[in-house]
């Protein structure tokens, strides 16, 4: 079974991907993790990646596809794939379809976690951490006993600069602008069914919904070994 998992920042996609991969015995390929590993390995491709990433630029599609295509042939890929963070553009989606068609192993489904912007903003802007001991809090879900102070060491908690509302809203806009064409591509031009899963409930409930969808895909007879 080969699946793509998409979702906005702050919707818990990384956590859900790990859980799904474990439950269904899929090789979890996170583009972020793979890029970091490729860089750390110091390969020629890793060097190219580093140039773009350090400059804060988007990595060109052909490099992304090359790195991910290589990762997809890794040990463990026989049991199935869960792609996370890839494809991010229509060109990448087309290249992925071509790659999988060549191997006669087409995608079985595209899972899209959806969540309300306000819910995501609330989750992300509520994060706090202790600059001294690193303990993590959330003003709504996991508040410290005393206001804005670390329970362990009494240090005043801080919010990451990236976690303020204006930055989060901008990231959500970027996500939509980037992924909407990709989702449209899958709906209109690809064989793989697109399944949306509500990401607003607590993480365990989202995991359940995702697992139900994967079971449905796998038992629909569409899933190929
Ligand atoms: Zn602390």
Image (cartoon, grey):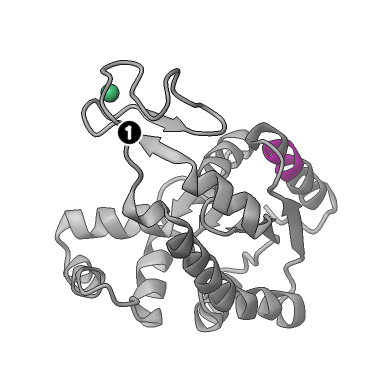
From the viewer's side, name the closer residue of 13 and 148.
148
Within 10 Å of disc 1 (Cα), the crowding (few <14, some 14-19, many 20+) is many
Q: Quadrant of ligand 1?
A: top left
Residue 150, position in %: x, y?
A: 33, 23
Magenta segment, which residues?
206-211
Q: Can you name the residue that lies furthest to the front here?
A: 147
From the viewer's side, name the closer residue of 212 and 107.
212
Q: Secondary structure at mark 1?
A: loop
Instruction: Examine the structure image and report whether residue 13 is included in the region drawn in magenta.
Output: no
23 to 111, vertically: above or below:
above
* Prevalent SS, magenta region: helix
From the viewer's side, name the closer residue of 97 and 124.
124
Q: Is residue 158 left or right of residue 54?
A: right
Residue 160, position in %: x, y?
A: 33, 48
Q: Residue at left 31%, top 60%?
A: 35
Q: Residue at left 41%, top 65%?
A: 68
Q: Is residue 154 left or right of residue 170?
A: left
28 to 193, vertically: above or below:
above
Residue 94, position in %: x, y?
A: 57, 81
Residue 86, position in %: x, y?
A: 49, 65
Q: Is any atom of residue 11 visible in this view?
A: no
Q: Residue at left 42%, top 67%?
A: 69
Q: Is any atom of residue 191 visible in this view?
A: yes
Q: Residue at left 47%, top 45%?
A: 76
Q: Which residue is mark 1?
A: 157
Q: Is residue 3 left or right of residue 157?
A: right
- Residue 64, image quadrant: bottom left
Instruction: Examine the structure image and report whether residue 207 is included in the region drawn in magenta.
Output: yes
């Amino acid at each position: 079974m080969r699946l793509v998992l998409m979702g906005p920042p702050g919707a818990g996609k990384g956590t859900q991907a790990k859980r799904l991969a474990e439950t269904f015995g899929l090789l979890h390929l996170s583009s972020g993790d793979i890029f970091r590993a490729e860089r750390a390995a110091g390969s020629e491709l890793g060097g190219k990646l580093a140039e773009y990433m350090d400059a804060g630029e988007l990595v060109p599609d052909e490099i992304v596809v090359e790195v991910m295509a290589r990762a997809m042939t890794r040990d463990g890929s026989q049991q199935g794939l869960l792609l996370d963070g890839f494809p991010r553009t229509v060109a990448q989606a087309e290249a992925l379809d071509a790659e999988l068609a060549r191997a006669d192993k087409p995608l079985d489904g595209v899972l899209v976690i959806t969540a309300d912007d306000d819910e995501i903003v609330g989750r992300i802007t509520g994060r706090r951490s202790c600059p001294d001991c690193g303990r993590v809090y959330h003003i709504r879900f996991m508040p410290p006993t005393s206001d804005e102070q670390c329970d362990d060491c009494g240090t005043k908690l801080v919010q990451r600069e990236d976690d303020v509302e204006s930055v989060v809203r901008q990231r959500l806009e970027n996500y939509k602008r980037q992924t909407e064409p990709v989702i449209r591509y899958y709906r209109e031009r690809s064989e793989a069914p697109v399944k949306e899963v509500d990401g607003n409930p607590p993480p365990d409930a989202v995991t359940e919904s995702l697992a139900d969808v994967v079971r449905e895909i796998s038992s629909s007879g569409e899933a190929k070994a």
